[in-house]
Amino acid sequence: MFKTETYVKRREILKSQINSGIAIFIGNDESPMNYADNTYHFRQDSSFLYYFGLNTAGLTGIIDFDEGKDYIFGNDLTVEDFVWMGYLPTIKEQSKKVGVQNTGTIADLDKLIKDAQLISRQIHVLPQYRAENKYKLFNWLNINPNETHKTESVELIKAVVSQREIKSDEELSEIEKAVNTSVDMHVAAMQMVKPGMMESEIAAKMMEIAIRDGGNISFPIIATKNGQTLHNHYHGNKLKEGDMLLLDCGAETALGYAGDLSSTMPVSNSFTDRQKEIYNIVLASHNKSIDMLAPGVPFKEVYYESCRVIVEGMKELGLMKGNTEDAIQSGAHAMFFPCGLGHQMGLDVHDMENLGEVYVGYGGKPKSTQFGIKSLRLAKKLVPGLVLTIEPGIYFIPSLIDMWKAENKLTDFINYDKLKTYKDFGGIRNEEDFVITTDRYKLLGKPKPKTIEDVENQKN
């Protein structure tokens, strides 16, 4: 964990933003896979980790904005627990490391919340994504688990977002550690991939490198020859000559900070000419987006510029036609680019996504409902200290091609006769991680091979 003062300061900043009441920060519990003692890899809730720093299951933090006090509640391990899990410091001992003096059991927590309700104190809660934590709110506050969204504190959400999205120097150092390990993962894949190999062999190597460096993967590994499926976690295909492997994976440090990179590489020693054409359009879109990064620039404008590069490139290949701006406004570009351009990153690989994209990525403004742009996770103006990814892509999705062609959709902009010859192409994307600085931006971590020449050179 960071030094004690870091967590004390974070909580003090939050206290200065909220006028009254108490805030409940529910830490995560162990989550069983198929029976109680066989659990998934434990991952602490990121907001709890940010303010209270303890990577222990079964804890809940309270910040009392009226009295200026902080609390951590949890039950100490019993002798039966020690046998299986080893000794763990008491809740009081752990809490001192993050500057919290007030501790108690879960029964004490129940009483504190009930006492607050009796005198009608305001109780702030964040959005919940785990069923067991929604059930806790039901027991404490009598909130229907299906309606917890109705009681979320917008005031607390906005305060947490404004604080967590600006990364400190010590956070940036952790993120760079994660990105450097992530680069090692991608370079290893470029060097080892070859015909006859299984996708699962690549995925296994990525996991090995992430764990070797003391952390874990920051999200389930995407290592697939079917890159047209954006979040493809199946690893059962054998790679052959002429295939491309789309790799989207990243490492997470022991403190929970994430890296997130994407690469597309040939399974053979080099890309085919057709693959190079599409790859270079994606790379041009990627580099143009990076060039636009600066404080005060709305990320939605960066997205639209990335779309323009893709549409112009597809027009040159005869896959699209017509006026570029009209094509983008109509959503025709989403045939090839149906997702967003990037997202914020930090303690979560999609930073604070559980708090709601409207607040995290849009500053409270509504999102578009148009196919393609509605998947844009970040649109608001960029500010110094914000960490984000840039990851444009081009995807040839057979079911989408067939659907739109059958509907005669956007025929003024899409050349379906030529497009059908690309139905077996797959997908390409390139992704890097950046922090916005006071003047422009900075690439986080060491550079990743991303030009055609650099990627192919890894294989030779």
Image (cartoon, rainbow, N blue to C red):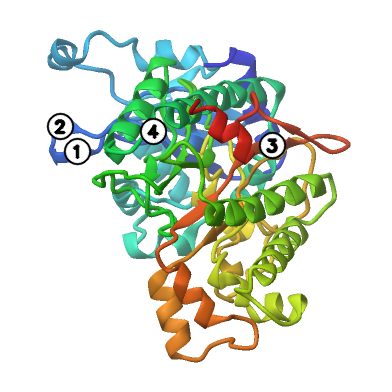
Of the two numbered discs 4 and 3 in the rendering, the one whose residue sits closer to the viewer: 4
Residue 14 image offset from top left, x and y in percent: 66, 36
Give how far apart the Cα atoms at labels 1 and 2 are: 6 Å
**Element type where label 3 sits in the image:** strand
Q: Are marks 1 and 2 in contact (CB under 8 Å)?
A: yes
Residue 169 image offset from top left, x and y in percent: 71, 22
Instruction: Check the image and report above or below for 238 versus 251.
Output: below
Which label number is shown at residue 434?
3
Please tell me how crowded label 3 is: few (under 14), some (14-19), or many (20+) other residues with Cα within 10 Å.
Answer: many
Residue drawn at the location 53% of the way across and 53% of the way down: 275
Which label number is shown at residue 32?
1
Of callouts 4 and 3, the N-terminal one: 4
Q: Are marks 4 and 3 in contact (CB under 8 Å)?
A: no
Q: Give the amino acid type for the residue marked by disc 4 in the picture.
A: Val
Of callouts 3 and 2, the N-terminal one: 2
Please tell me how crowded label 2 is: few (under 14), some (14-19), or many (20+) other residues with Cα within 10 Å.
Answer: few
Most foreground residue, 330 or 110: 330
Of callouts 1 and 2, the N-terminal one: 1
Give how far apart the Cα atoms at labels 1 and 4 are: 34 Å
Which label number is shown at residue 38?
2
Which label number is shown at residue 193?
4
